[in-house]
Image: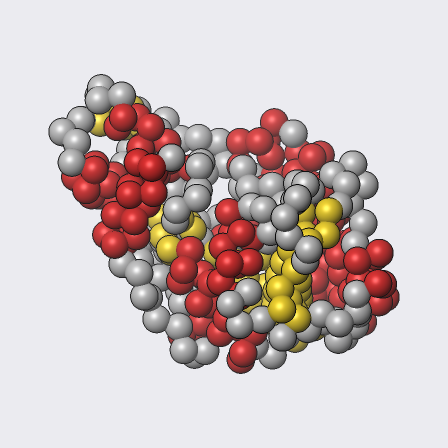
């Protein structure tokens, strides 16, 4: 199978590349220069256009779009840049596939940020109510995908990951806490600690993508990517600190970051129908993350 991974230098994209190249003919694509791989397309960040790639290489069976910005705070500071990366570039990708490779199936990596966030499990059919520019721009990209499915019969699946983590991720909660732990001083975190998140290890996300490639209809369907577990941040950080072997203490400042939902827990019955089950527990995933972080 011929697979193209857009955003192959990013966290999810780089893991996708390593995972699928074992049994497939896989190409990467990103804005970062690669001096080693012969199966790599360099695109200019100033003018991202995928037409030439698909016009000259119309043999791709699958395209996985892992590209785009992934920071709520940055989307608030610079909404135009976030729109360009998370919405406009998706339009460019969809239209290039439409024109030059209409049989190529697209997996669009969206985000749980399209949901407002509630304390009850969130189904794919829940009302969509983003609370950040990032969430809105991911929603716009989903709407573009559905437009191309409806009007041009494009072959698309939309995936909404919740809180993805794993080795190689040098940002977000665990990277931040790890660097605080290293200082061996009491530290403070945003929120109350009662907020919930539904974490999924990167290898389980790849498992979901593989299931979609094998069993998805590619008719615009949407899947949550999570484990259906709404875990309290306070409990998660206690586990993380304990696994690190540190005795450092932490507190919460009871301030909510703009654009951050209070609760996230996914309903994953839909992805279970494809055969999904959790392979990596949070404890095992955090142990692996700490081992990786200590070597960086």
* 275 sits left or right of 67 in the view: left
* 175 sits left or right of 247 in the view: right
* 130 sits left or right of 148 in the view: left
Choose between 273 and 208: the one closer to the eye: 208
Report if residue 129 is visible in the image: no
- Quarter of the picture containing the N terminus is bottom right
Q: Position of residue 38 (x, y in %)?
A: 68, 55
Q: What residue is shown at x 26% (from left), y 28% (from top)? A: 181
- Quarter of the picture containing the C terminus is top left
What is the basis of the colouring in this image? secondary structure
Choose between 202 and 123: the one closer to the eye: 202
Q: What residue is shown at x 45% (from left), y 78% (from top)? A: 274
Q: Position of residue 287 (x, y in %)?
A: 25, 48
Q: What residue is shown at x 66% (from left), y 71% (from top)? A: 2
Q: Position of residue 280 (x, y in %)?
A: 31, 61
| Quadrant in the rendering for residue 248 | top left
Q: Position of residue 53 (x, y in %)?
A: 79, 58
Choose between 56 and 142: the one closer to the eye: 56
Q: What residue is shown at x 65% (from left), y 44% (from top)? A: 34
Choose between 249 and 37: the one closer to the eye: 37
| Quadrant in the rendering for residue 146 | bottom right
């Amino acid at each position: 199978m011929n697979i193209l991974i857009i955003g192959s230098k990013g966290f999810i994209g780089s893991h996708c590349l390593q995972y699928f190249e074992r049994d497939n003919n896989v190409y990467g694509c990103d804005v970062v220069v690669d001096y080693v791989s012969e199966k790599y397309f360099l695109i200019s960040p100033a003018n991202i256009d995928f037409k030439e790639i698909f016009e000259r290489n119309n043999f791709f069976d699958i395209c996985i779009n892992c590209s785009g910005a992934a920071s709520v705070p940055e989307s608030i500071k610079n909404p135009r840049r976030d729109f360009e990366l998370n919405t406009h570039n998706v339009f460019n990708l969809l239209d290039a596939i439409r024109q030059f490779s209409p049989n190529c199936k697209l997996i669009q990596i969206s985000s749980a940020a399209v949901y407002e966030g509630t304390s009850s499990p969130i189904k794919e059919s829940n009302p969509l109510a983003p609370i950040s520019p990032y969430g809105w721009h991911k929603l716009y990209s989903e709407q573009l995908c559905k437009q191309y499915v409806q009007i041009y019969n494009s072959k698309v699946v939309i995936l909404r990951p919740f809180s993805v983590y794993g080795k190689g991720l040098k940002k977000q909660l665990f990277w931040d806490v790890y660097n605080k732990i290293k200082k061996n001083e009491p530290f403070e975190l945003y929120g109350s600690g009662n907020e919930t998140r539904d974490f999924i290890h990167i290898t389980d996300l790849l498992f979901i993508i593989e299931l979609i490639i094998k069993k998805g209809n590619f008719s615009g369907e949407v899947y949550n990517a999570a484990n259906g577990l709404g875990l309290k941040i306070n409990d998660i950080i206690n586990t993380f600190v304990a696994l690190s072997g540190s005795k450092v203490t932490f507190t919460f400042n009871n301030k909510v970051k703009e654009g951050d939902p209070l609760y996230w827990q996914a309903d994953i019955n839909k992805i279970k129908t494809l055969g999904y089950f959790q392979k990596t527990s949070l404890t095992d995933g955090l142990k692996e993350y700490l081992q990786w972080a200590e070597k960086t």
